[in-house]
Image (tube, rainbow, N blue to C red):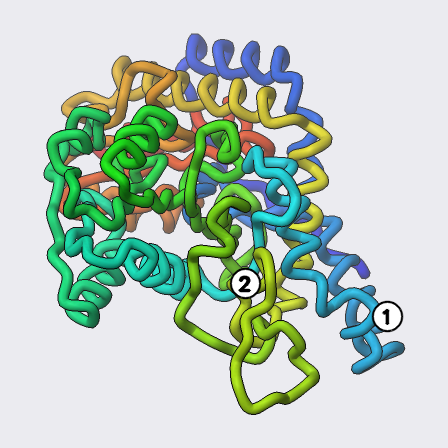
Amino acid sequence: MTVPAASAAPPVNLPAALRERAAALDAGDPLARYRDRFAPSEGLIAYLDGNSLGRPLTATRERLASFVDGPWAARLIRSWDEGWMDAPTELGDTLGRVVLGAAPGQTVVADSTTVLLYKLARAAVDARPGRRVIVADTENFPTDRFVLQGIAAERGLELRWITPDAEAGVTPQDVADAVGPDTALVLLSHVAYKSGYVADLPAITRIVHDAGALVLWDLCHSAGSVPLDLDAGGVDIAVGCTYKYLNGGPGSPAFAYLAAGLQDEVRQPVQGWMGAADPFAMGPEYEPATGIRQLISGTPPVIGMLPMRDMLALVEEAGMPAVRAKSLALTGFAMEIADEYLAGVRVASPRDPERRGSHIMLDHPDFRRVVAEAWARGVVPDFRPPQGLRVGLSPLSTSFTEVAEGLWTIHALLG
């Protein structure tokens, strides 16, 4: 298949010192060779939104075409017995090994983030009968908060809100002050979707367990960019998406982690035939499958899993420690540029690299206009109300020069 070459983006006249600094960082970048594996984007100067939608790999084009002609057209329904049926758990194990720090049999790929959050949160509160409180934070992504509001109304539970410092995020002390013998579940994001703050996952998990509750971690902004060790951290349950740093594409399926020690205790509420012990028995009563497969409800999104396989292979080749090192270098460089060149802009993300994910938030009252104009010029960050410009840097597809040119364009638009 022939794809037309991307047209050249208009030049950005960087200051000499900034251009030289970016070029030196690119020259010393051990992951620079991976950028050529991503499909080109016509007219693009800088893609600064990799934490919303990752760029496609060129290998995925061939994988999708081969799938149509191979397993789908050539094998048809026989492919269910030849791999499709086991794809959610097989790919889940790969994801667990490469990015989650999870032993086999604890991760499954299925559904959307919202559906998995509902299934796992509902299951968690039901696994702690008599406890009436769910703890969450006001700065979390709307889906997380909305799902919990629905469950609280459905089950007659109380929502207890933590209101953290928007830039510092939820701290262990915040959680310790909120949980108690009445707490059933705590739901938090490992990396805050606005500020990029990385929560202290092991410490918070211990605090929740000491209170006798379960903790559900949202990994949407960390899976594939921040190293995780769910097993070692004692995590109970986790959910995340795959279209950000795992480059699964728009609408790619989410994943769920359920610790092996809880798989006989936690029962998800959406009882579909694919999660039954024997789907093809077509029996009159539901009997859940054993192990992680019980989290599946409906037909696995087989096509939606294909792009993620290419990205997981790439992440495994590069190694998560190297990915994390590049992520911190990129976000640190973006902060340097903001401090030196973006007058009137405030960095609203952690300065401490240990507490920073792979995106930063910049604040300025004119950013709604600036983001819209930047998109028209081939620079693509995203806007988050009330006045935030989020710079999401996917380490394997982003260069330092790209960051410099993108933020210098923001400088020009601020006037």
In the image, what residue occupies the spot 43% across and 73% down? Answer: 270
In the image, what residue occupies the spot 48% across and 29% down? Answer: 226
Q: Observer-nearest residue: 344 or 305? A: 305
Q: Observer-nearest residue: 294 or 364? A: 294
Identify which amino acid the numbered label 2 is placed on: Ala
Q: Earlier in the sequence, mark 1 or mark 2?
A: 1
In the image, what residue occupies the spot 65% across and 37% down? Answer: 97
Nearer the observer: mark 1 or 2; the answer is: 2
Residue 6, x across and y down, in percent: 63, 48
Q: Which mark is residue 110?
A: 2
Q: Is residue 119 left or right of residue 398?
A: left
Measure the C-alpha gap from mark 1 to mark 2: 23 Å
Residue 232, x across and y down, in percent: 50, 28
Q: Quadrant of residue 278?
A: bottom right
Q: Which residue is mark 1?
A: 70
Q: Is residue 66 left or right of residue 223?
A: right
Q: Quadrant of residue 379?
A: top left
